[in-house]
Amino acid sequence: MSVTEYDAIILGAGVAGLTAGSFLAERGFKVALVTSGEPTVCLSTGCIDVCSRDHNPLTGIKGLAPEHPFHLVPEKTIRESLNNFQTAMMDMGFPYTGTAEENRLILSALGTFKTSCLVPSTMKAAPQDTKDSIHIITFAGLKDFYPSYILSRRKNTKFSVYDAGVSSTMGIASLFEEKDFLESFIDWLKGQNIGEDKIAFPAVLGLESAAEIVQKIAAHIGKPVFEIPTIPPSMPGRRLFNAMKDYFRKKGGDIYWEWPVIGVEKSGRIIEAVMTASKGRPNSLNGKAFILATGSFVGGGITAGRETITENIFNLQVFAPSPRETWFENDYFSFNHGIGRAGIKVDSSLRPEGSRWENIFVCGGILADTEILKNGCGHGLALATAHLAAQSCMEHIR
Amino acid sequence: MIKTDVIIIGGGATGCGIARDLALRGIPHCLIEKGDFAAGATGACHGLLHSGGRYVVTDPIAAKECYDENLILRRIGEKCVEQTGGLFVRLPGDSKRFRELFLRGCEDVGIPTEVISSTNALDLVPNLNPELEEAIKVPDCSIDPFRLCMLNIRTSQLRDGIIFTRHKVTEIVQSHGRCIGIKATDQATGEVREIRGNIIVNATGAWANMIASLAGCEVPMTLAKGSLVITNHRLTNMVINRLRPPSDGDIIVPNEAVCLAGTTSLAVENPDKIGIESTEVDTIISEAGRMIPHFNHTRIIRAFSGVRPLLKSKKMDAHEISRGFQIIDHGNGMYSIAGGKLTTFRLMAEKMVDTIMVSFKLKRACETAEIPLDGQEELSGYPLSKRLADMKDVVCECELVSRKEVERIINQTGTRNVGDIQHRTRLGMGPCQGGFCTFRALGIMNDMSVISPEQSMEMLRGFLQRRFRGIRYALWGDQLREEQLVEYIYLGILAMEKPQ
């Protein structure tokens, strides 16, 4: 069995885990990040939602329910986490637009508006009202994008179909990374003589160089160009993950990819190591502190049984409304399903409440009382709580 | 206005069976159904073709009818019946006395049985509870109720029967105290059709009393709701029954790639207002888990309920009410056919049409038991071999349905309802329960201009709301995980708003 020593071990490779990892690595700590697979950030729009309940996200946070974990993070830390994120993404060539004081709108694939705080530069030109006329370019055979849904909401909208020869989101995105393809596409687009104010695309404009591709198309056509996020597989989500992952590695962090945790070594009030399995060989990753950022149900951090909900690594106590009938309301669109509150309750340093472990810090979607859909606070909450968890972790190590 | 001889209201197994029988006896007819075929109890049952064993102790007449029909359907409907065979399993604590009554009852009715040891039962179905005492083998089968309706209707279509689905009967036209026709509204367009006929057959199952009341008549019935759950896996290749008096959660039926387990029985007033309760789901799962322990850990993809249209009875427990059927002559040109069950639908249709022949003073014997069902090759579902042959542009990954197949159904049926595509292709029947593919199917319907952009949005919203009713009570484990993702897609990524 191999044993490796670290200052901090991060569990989970989503926005929260990678943010906490980079924070510590940047400050000279030896950090390992363990993940059992691809994180759910790859399924997301890539936008950083902080709080959609008010035009000013910071004001919106003040109005959240008293038990919401956002209240544990000082406003200064929230701002800092958003700034650091923007700096890091700029550094990785995947810049984000927006400020902590103001929400923006992005156009959804159903023609509705989605509220977010920081958005990838490829969505910067999205209309902020219904006035702009839009021309949508879609791709022959693309099964996850139908301009008709947008037409049902916006009257001044037209669309054209381009046959790229491939029909998957990923396939088209890879083609856009090829110089020749991009040039012949731009020639075709010029020939369309588009009269509308703006040009919209499903989010398939490239993998890592999407920001440049969007800029290039806009420059050649002379009109603002923006992307519309699609249902998974989502390119903006994947780009965000790749940029954050590369940033973490650049800062010296180690990633243990597809290393599911199979056991925990503990002593007194301290977790000493997580045992992981890779290629059939047991490994022990020893750490002074552990950051739990394994996500909620979709991410695999917690699992629901018929009556109880369990946390999958440390078997921490999970808060959940009870009985099961209260997990969901009858109305699908209620935005108020009780299950949205399930997760780990924490104290002000983000240690799990009521637990004897002194060196576990919890952040991101696995926290209790987040109600992410209702509050529109996904990746933003992950950034802010990851900063706080990393700070607490640092204090603990010292 | 359309003129015909017999108007059939209801497109469940009974109505479709009557249409086939009338077609084979050369009687012009028209069938009206307010939804799609098999929309009521026919489609909301476990798809069991009874051997009759379940009823030998409580209702030997119904048991005999079931067994006779079981033999007939296996012969005429080879492609929609899966000859799985069935077991009645006796678990520790189950009454030995009931076992004796059961075996004697089967012998009296003529149902072949074979008592097998627990070891042999486990050889047949390895997932069974290893503690079982013994099992009794019976000729149960599984049947696809939707396909059964389609095949019966096929004969009618081939012989000039007139069929209207998604048409709701709103009025029974009467003249001098006799029913002479009906008015039905097209559910998509709101257009009203008038159809005239000499005889009206009310084959609307749980809705029979509502339809009869349009003509001032009554059909006394007891409505008993039964709930079922569907698993993501086929945990058994045989039908598994519990060897004990009929009660909740005593049956598991394999069907295509899944298993259905049920049922419960609760009296209800209104067949349009039925829901499922968590306690029902829990009862079914723990009872099914007694027979097949794996049930406690397997993924449940949804729960649903149907309403049994039972004959009125003084018995308090609906488990004990007869599964027999009855033809009611309202004396005004309208007949109602009530009670019965899926397994005996053909017999019910035969008796109904015999009655009609008498009233028309015609003599032509029923042939539905001898002639195989029409269209079994072309309508035998959409088998995996066909699905795998066409993997280009798959729009439903769970059930492997291609865009081409969706387009074919839209062109063939001219449907504007996504449910019709689901029933005919299995689109949306898999683990994600239409979470991904319905968004696509509605987009395709819009691309083909059968619905407007506004309608596609409206239908997507309606679909999500209906879908949730089925899955809400079976959400834990992986299914809850999948549902959280689907919810995130629609309400998060696609930013769907709360309806006004």
Image (cartoon, rainbow, N blue to C red):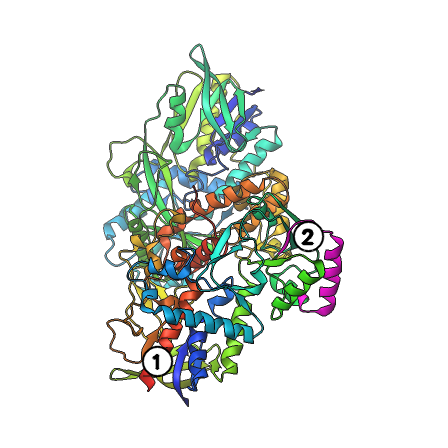
Quadrant for residue B203, please give it.
Answer: top left
Give the vertical position of B140 relative to B92 (above or below).
Answer: above
Which residue is identified by label 1? A393
| Residue at 42 percent of width and 46 percent of height | B498
Chain to which the residue tagged by mark 2 belongs:
A
Q: Establish whether labels 2 and 1 are both on one chain.
A: yes
Which residue is identified by label 2? A161
Q: Which amino acid is tagged 1?
A: Cys
Q: Mark 1 falls on what kind of element? A: helix
Q: Position of residue B103 (x, y in %)?
A: 31, 48
In this picture, which residue range is highlighted in magenta?
A176-200
- Image side of residue B165 versus residue A172, left or right: left
**Picture disc at residue A170:** none
User: Do we see residue A197 in this rendering?
Assistant: yes
- Image side of residue A97 versus residue B205, left or right: right
Residue at mark 2 to residue at mark 1: CA–CA distance? 52 Å
Q: Residues within 10 Å of mark 1 (few under 14, many from 20)?
A: many
Give the vertical position of A291 relative to B35 (above or below).
Answer: below
Between A221 and B80, the one lying in front of the other is: A221
Q: Are marks 2 and 1 in contact (CB under 8 Å)?
A: no
Q: Which amino acid is tagged 2?
A: Val
| Residue at 49 percent of width and 33 percent of height | B11
| Residue at 56 percent of width and 43 percent of height | A152
| Residue at 23 percent of width and 50 percent of height | B97
